[in-house]
Structure formats: structure tokens, C-alpha cells
Image (cartoon, grey):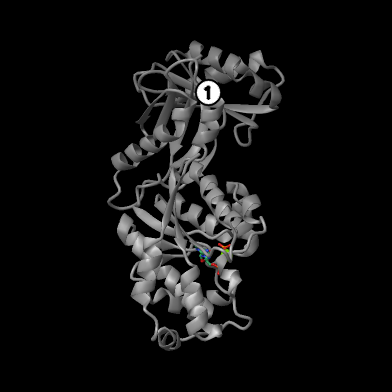
């Protein structure tokens, strides 16, 4: 019965990023996310995107939950459309929002008038509807400063809309508006959070996972695929590039000083991720690194790993405490899967005494006898691509 979803759009402040491309991308992302819930008409007017069901078969609850995971939206509300008439709006508020009004002790009405030909001012409309609602729900008090529920009336081009307080949206920018990056996804807590944070800034992701069969089990690989799948409600459909990494690790163990193993391994990860990025048009790499968390995450170690990549390496978790990362992981739904106990390829060969402050010269000297190009090429040629979707 005329129920629809209103989305308030977030920041559109980037220079050169015009409103039109922001809206088009958001609408395309919404359409892709919503098709499983029925057929919707999606359009944008004045910083609000409207999601209207085309018929009664649409699953509005499912759609409402889904749009809360679409980046670029700051507020979400279920609303009802009605005629642009004060009494129609009053009647809609009285019936459609009755549960909210009965549950609250204080309220206020806020009106917006995008259609300036509407005969009342916003203040007159709020006063009229507020007064009538007060009579209809005598237990309610008006509180203009801290109301428990705010009734919003919006008089727009084609109709009026009535809704109560919006819930927060996912924030950020529509995925795809800021290009593409390759994210290094391990089975841990940090890298899914890092991926989510970069996707939130409007970046489409390709996932790379380094897999060390038989040192790590097929379950470890499945866990990473599952983590990627859990990210798709936020990021959209994803490809996980599963890189066979065993040969490289064995070669490093055979030929290089054990205390440099981790940093050398990470240099190979970056080289391979960069090659994947080149092939899919990505312009940055993303990792879940966090300063000082483990031996490979000192500034010197990051200098050594960064030196093999021309692309910027984005490390959004760099300044977060573990507790903060975990909080995000729980919120986005990856935490429970991340803590499943499967070995990551990093832990398998980890030396007992890794070098905390390696120098670039040391790392380069240790690699001098390796066929770096051949090792990278073989790994890239062995990549298995797994598509994941909701
Ligand atoms: P995480 O919780 O994300 O596993 P971590 O604290 O275990 O991080 P490391 O194991 O040192 O840290 O890895 C640092 C980053 O390197 C990870 O966040 C991830 O981006 C990348 N990485 C590590 N192992 C892999 C892997 N097997 N495949 C892909 N990327 C990896
Ligand atoms: Mg890890």
C-alpha cells in the first residue's frame, strides 16, 4: 500500500566527482542488490533516492535490510506516499505510524516543502499535523528538542511522503565510483575489515588469496571464499583469485635466510597482487596490516614489502587497535568466520626469530639468486578464479 524506501544520499564532495555519476552508480548498485526482492522503480531527486515497489509481490522487509548495506547512503527510512494535501498526510501519519506514536512519549513533526506551490508553509503544516496528532494520541507530549519520535512530512514534486526517524545507512561512497583495487584477503580478522573500509570509499575490489596446499587445508581456502561471500552484500559480486603459493614458499625456505622468510614472502605477495592488479585494471593494493601488530608490520618491514610495488598500498587498519578492528568485524558480519581455527599460509613457515627491522639491501641481497620473474609468472598462471555472490 504505497510503502516505499527513502534513501538520504551521503557526501558528494570529491572534486571532479559529479552528482550525476554518484547518483547513477548508486542507482545501479541498488538495482543489482534489490532484484532478488522484486521489481522496483529507483530514481533520485534532490539528494533523496526513492525505491518504489512496482507491485505488491515485493519483499519490502528484505529490500529495507539490503539497502542498509549499500554504500553512499547516510539514512534509510520506510515511508508511505500520499496526496499532497495536509489532511491526507495527517491521515497517513495517524495510521501508518500508529505503532511508533503509541510507543513514544514525546514527538515532534518536521516538514519539508520542496514543492513551493504547496499552500501552507512548512511551519504551518507541522503545526497543523502536530496539533491533530496530539489530539489523536493524547498520551503524547510535544518535545521539539529531544523527541522520542520525529514525524517527517515531505512535500515533493509528485507526491507527499510520510515517515518516522530514518535509520543510519552504510555511509561512504557508491562502490565503483573510485575505481578498482586488489585486496589481499587472508583468513584473519583484519583483511576483511580492511577490504570493507576501502570498498566503503567507493572502490570496487578484486580479492587475492595466497594458498599453500597442502600446508594449509582446503577448509582454510573455503573459509576465505566464505569471508569474501560475507563481504558481497557491501561490496557487490567479487572474484577471489586463489594463487598457488606453495612453490614460492618452499623455494624461499630452501634458498634464503630463515629470519628474512616473512618479509621476502610478503614481497612476493605484493609482486603477484600487482600483476593481478595490472590485468584487471586495479590502481591500488589493500592489506589488513596494522602498525606493530606482528613482525612483518614494522615500518622497516613495510618499507621492504612496499619497495616491490609501484601501486599505492592502502592499509586502512594501520592505526586501529585490535579491539577496534574486531568491533568493525562484528558489525559487518565477518568476525565469527574469521576466528574459525584454520592455519594461514603466513603462519606455516614463520621463522622462530623473524627480523623485526630488515633493511631493503638485505632483502634484495637475499633474493639475488632467485628467478623472481619466473616464480611470479608460474604463480600467476596457476591462479584459480572463484566468483562469489550473495
Ligand atoms: P589478518 O587478520 O588479515 O590475517 P594478520 O594480522 O594475520 O592479518 P599478517 O598475517 O601479517 O597479519 O598479514 C598481513 C596482511 O597480509 C593481511 O591483512 C592480508 O592483507 C595479507 N595476507 C596475509 N596472508 C595472506 C594470504 N594467505 N592471502 C592473501 N593475503 C594475505
Ligand atoms: Mg593473517
Pick the front one: 173 or 376: 376
Q: Is residue 19 left or right of residue 122?
A: left
> Where is residue 313 drawn, in percent x and y?
41, 66
Residue 312 seen anywhere in this rendered image of the structure: no
Residue plotted at (46% across, 86% down) = 359
**Ligand 1 within 8 Å, label 1 CB:** no
Pick the front one: 170 or 194: 194
Residue plotted at (54% across, 21% down) = 127
Residue plotted at (51% across, 14% down) = 1
Residue 236 seen anywhere in this rendered image of the structure: yes
Q: Which residue is mark 1?
A: 59
Crowd around label 1: few <14 · some 14–19 · many ≥20 (10 Å): some
The image quadrant that residue 382 belongs to is: bottom left
> Where is residue 48 drawn, in percent x and y?
41, 32
> Where is residue 351 drawn, in percent x and y?
60, 80
Pick the front one: 360 or 378: 378
> Where is residue 211 drawn, in percent x and y?
51, 62
Q: Is residue 324 left or right of residue 13?
A: right
Residue plotted at (69% across, 21% down) = 102
Element class at badge 1? loop
Q: Quadrant of ligand 1?
A: bottom right
Q: Image height check: is 23 above or below 93?
A: below
Amino acid at each position: 500500500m504505497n510503502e516505499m524506501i527513502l534513501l538520504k544520499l551521503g557526501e558528494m564532495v570529491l572534486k571532479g566527482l559529479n552528482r550525476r555519476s554518484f547518483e547513477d552508480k548508486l542507482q545501479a548498485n541498488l538495482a543489482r542488490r534489490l532484484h532478488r526482492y522484486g521489481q522496483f522503480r529507483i530514481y533520485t531527486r534532490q539528494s533523496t533516492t526513492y525505491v518504489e515497489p512496482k507491485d505488491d509481490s515485493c519483499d519490502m522487509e528484505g529490500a529495507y535490510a539490503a539497502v542498509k548495506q549499500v554504500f553512499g547512503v547516510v539514512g534509510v527510512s520506510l515511508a508511505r506516499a500520499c496526496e499532497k494535501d495536509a489532511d491526507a498526510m495527517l491521515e497517513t501519519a495517524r495510521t501508518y505510524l500508529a505503532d511508533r506514536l503509541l510507543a513514544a512519549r514525546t514527538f515532534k513533526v518536521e516538514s519539508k516543502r520542496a514543492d513551493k506551490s504547496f499552500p501552507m508553509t512548512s511551519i504551518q503544516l507541522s503545526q497543523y499535523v502536530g496539533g491533530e496528532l496530539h489530539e489523536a494520541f493524547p498520551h503524547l507530549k510535544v518535545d521539539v528538542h529531544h523527541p522520542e519520535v520525529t514525524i517527517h512530512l515531505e512535500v515533493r514534486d509528485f507526491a507527499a511522503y510520510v515517515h518516522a526517524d530514518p535509520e543510519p545507512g552504510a555511509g561512504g561512497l557508491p562502490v565503483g565510483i573510485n575505481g578498482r583495487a586488489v585486496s589481499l584477503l587472508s583468513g584473519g580478522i583484519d583483511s576483511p575489515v580492511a577490504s570493507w573500509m576501502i570498498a566503503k570509499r567507493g572502490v570496487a575490489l578484486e580479492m587475492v588469496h595466497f594458498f599453500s596446499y597442502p600446508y594449509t587445508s582446503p577448509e582454510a581456502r573455503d573459509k576465505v571464499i566464505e569471508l569474501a561471500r560475507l563481504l558481497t552484500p557491501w561490496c557487490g559480486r567479487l572474484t577471489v583469485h586463489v594463487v598457488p603459493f606453495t612453490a614460492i614458499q618452499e623455494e624461499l625456505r630452501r634458498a634464503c635466510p630463515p629470519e628474512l622468510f616473512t618479509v621476502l614472502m610478503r614481497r612476493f605477495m605484493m609482486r603477484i597482487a600487482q600483476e593481478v592488479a595490472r590485468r584487471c585494471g586495479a590502481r591500488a593494493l589493500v592489506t589488513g596490516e596494522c602498525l606493530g601488530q606482528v613482525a612483518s608490520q614494522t615500518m622497516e618491514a613495510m618499507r621492504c614489502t612496499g619497495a616491490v610495488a609501484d601501486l599505492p598500498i592502502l592499509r586502512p587498519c594501520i592505526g586501529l587497535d585490535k579491539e577496534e578492528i574486531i568491533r568493525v568485524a562484528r558489525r559487518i558480519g565477518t568476525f565469527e568466520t574469521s576466528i574459525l581455527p584454520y592455519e594461514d599460509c603466513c603462519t606455516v613457515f614463520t621463522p622462530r626469530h623473524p627480523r623485526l627491522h630488515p633493511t631493503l639491501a638485505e632483502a634484495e641481497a637475499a633474493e639475488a639468486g632467485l628467478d623472481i620473474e619466473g616464480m611470479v609468472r608460474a604463480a600467476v598462471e596457476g591462479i584459480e578464479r572463484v566468483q562469489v555472490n550473495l
